[in-house]
Amino acid sequence: MKALSLTEPMAWAVFHGKDVENRRWPTKLRGRVYIHASKGFDKGHYNFLALEGMACLLDEPLPGPSEFVHGAIIGEVDIVDCVETHVSRWFFGPYALVLRNAVEYDTPIPCKGMLGFFEPKVK
């Protein structure tokens, strides 16, 4: 199965209400993929999620910055489409992967990430 690495807190958000993942590139890939939480943390994205307008779209309160998992596969999700427009409030484009059936793992699996889709090599 392929994996897609996302910086925190957006990797976490996939399992708590985020239904699309914005990309600069389109893909024909569909199906189940792992979500990998990269070692990076995006302070701008954290501040974006903390705003009242986006926080209301999450199914639980945003954890503190030090509470996020890094460098691990944290769950899996179905990519059902790749679109240039979408009604989701999470859509900013120019492309978005449409996500469904997200399952967050109880125990993250340590793994090195890569850009784009990749075949994970778990430790």
Image (cartoon, grey):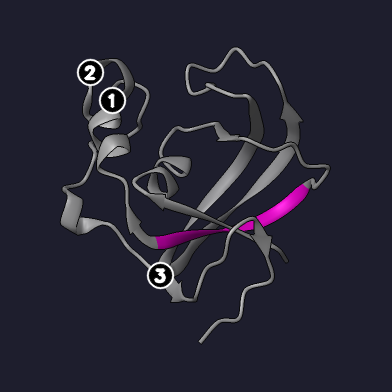
Check if residue 35 falls in the magenta segment. Answer: yes
Q: Are marks 2 and 1 in contact (CB under 8 Å)?
A: yes
Amino acid type of the residue that numbered disc 1 sits on in the rendered structure: Ala
Could you classify mark 2 by the number of other residues whose Cα lies within 10 Å: few (under 14), some (14-19), or many (20 or more)?
A: few
* Magenta highlight: main SS: strand
> Which residue is situated farthest in the top direction here?
87
At 59% across and 24% down in the image, what residue appears?
93
**Placement of 69 over or under 11, stated as above or below:** below
> Which residue is situated farthest in the right direction here?
28
Question: In the image, which residues are magenta?
Answer: 31-38
Q: CA distance from mark 2 to mark 3?
A: 28 Å
Residue 37 figure quarter: bottom left
Q: Mark 1: which secondary structure?
A: helix
Q: Mark 2: which secondary structure?
A: helix
Which label's residue is closer to the chain start, 2 or 3? Answer: 2
**Could you say where residue 8 lies in the image, as x and y percent from the top left?**
35, 50
Q: Horizontally, is 50 left or right of 11 in the view?
A: left
| Residue bearing mark 1 | 55
Amino acid type of the residue that numbered disc 2 sits on in the rendered structure: Glu
At 25% across and 42% down in the image, what residue appears?
43
**Could you say where residue 99 lies in the image, as x and y percent from the top left?**
63, 37
Which label's residue is closer to the chain start, 3 or 1? Answer: 1
| Residue bearing mark 2 | 52
At 64% across and 55% down in the image, what residue appears?
116
